[in-house]
Image (cartoon, rainbow, N blue to C red):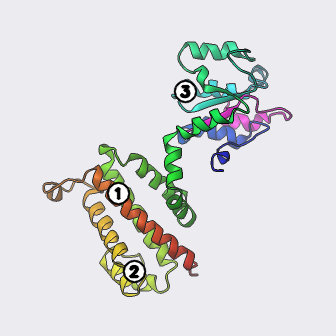
Amino acid sequence: MWRKQILWKLNIVSRPALRKVVSHQERYALLIIDRNLAEYDEYDFEEIAEIDPAYNDSLYESFFEREGDYLLHKLVYESNVMNRFYLLTGNSIRSDPVRGYDDISMLIDFGKFSEKNFFEKGNESELQKIIENVPILNLQKENEYYLNILQKNIGNRSSDNFLKILQEEDDKRRIGDNLKEMRIIYEQILRECSERIPDMKENCSNDYGKIIMGSQTANWLSNNRHINSVIRNFFFSIKTIASDFGNHDNKRESSVYEPTTDTVKALVYSLKDIISWFGKICSQNSKTE
C-alpha cells in the first residue's frame, strides 16, 4: 500500500508539483513522471512563470503531451538525475520510438539519461523493482513506526532529521553531527512531554521556564513512575555522550576514547526506545492548556 502512495496522478503540471520538481528536486530520492501530464486542461502561464520564467508558448507547444520531457530537460543539466528520474510512457521506446525521441536520444548519447529510465505504463513489476531498490525508501519503511511518532507529535523536521541520522549512521565524518542531532531530538521529546505529563513543567523547569535536560527531570519522571531504569539510563547516555562529543571537540574526553560509528548506532537504538516510550506518553496524555 505504501508504494502506491509514492505516485500521484495529475492531469496538469500543477504549480505545487512543478515547484517540487524544479525548485526542490534535491529533496526527493525518486521522481517518477508521466510523460503526458496534461490531457485536457490548459496551463496557467502566469502561475508557471512564477516558478520557471523560461516557460513560454513555444515551450508549451514543443512539449505538448510530453510535459514530463520538459521537466527532464529542466533538471538534467542541474544535477545527476539518471539514478532517480524515471519517465512513464505509453509506448516502448525501443520498439516504437515515441514523440520527441530525437530530443531524448540526444540526452542518452551524452550520457545524461538512459533507456532504462523509461518504463511502460502498466508495468507494475518494473515499477516495484525500482522502488524497492531505493535505499532511503526501504529505510523509511523499516523505521516507519518511529518516524510517524516524531512526525505526528513534534513535526516533519524532527522526523526528517531522525531519518537522516539513520541514513548516515555509518559515515565517520558525521559522527559528531549525528550525536548533536540525537541530542536535539531527545530535548524536543522532553519539551513535548512537559506539555502532556501533569505537573512536569512545574517541577522540571528552570527559572526561565525552560525544561531542565539533566538529572532533575530524569529523577522526577522516575520518582513519579513515568520512566523506568531502561529509559532513565538511555536519557543519560544520549544527554552525556552527545553533550561531550556532539557540540565541539572535547579534547579531554577524546584523549581517553573517541566515539565511533558503533557509538552512533548504539545511541540510535537507545533513541528508538525513547521514541517508543514517547509515543505511549502522547497516546495517554493530551496536551495541557
Count the numbered circles shown. Answer: 3
Q: Position of residue 13 (x, y in %)?
A: 74, 36
Q: How far apart are marks 3 and 1 (CA)?
A: 33 Å
Give the residue displayed 45% in from the left and 69% down from the top: 189
Q: On the rendered structure, is 62 left or right of 139?
A: right
Residue annotated with mark 3: 82
Q: Where is residue 201 in the image (x, y as percent from the top left)?
A: 45, 82
Q: How far apart are marks 1 and 2 (CA)?
A: 22 Å
Q: Say which mark, if any, is on residue 205.
A: 2
Q: Say which mark, if any, is on residue 180.
A: 1
Q: What stretch is highlighted in magenta?
A: 30-54
Tag 2: amino acid: Ser
Is residue 52 magenta-colored? yes
Q: Where is residue 49 in the image (x, y as percent from the top left)?
A: 71, 34
Give the residue displayed 67% in from the left and 46% down from the top: 4
Q: If you read the primary sequence from the N terminus, does the residue marked by circle 3 or circle 1 appear first?
A: 3
274, 73: nearer the viewer? 274
Give the residue displayed 63% in from the left and 50% down from the top: 2
Quarter of the view holding residue 181: bottom left
125, 9: nearer the viewer? 125
Q: On the rendered structure, is 209 left or right of 107?
A: left
Q: If you read the primary sequence from the N terminus, does the residue marked by circle 3 or circle 2 appear first?
A: 3
Few, some or many residues within 10 Å of mark 3 (<14, 14–19, 20+): some
96, 164: nearer the viewer? 96
Q: On the rendered structure, is 214 left or right of 38?
A: left
Q: Can residue 54 be seen?
A: no
Q: Nearer the viewer's eye, disc 1 or disc 2?
A: 1
Q: Report the residue that reaches farthest toward the front.
A: 125
Q: Nearer the viewer's eye, disc 3 or disc 2?
A: 3
Q: Where the C terminus falls, by quadrant? A: bottom right
Few, some or many residues within 10 Å of mark 2 (<14, 14–19, 20+): some
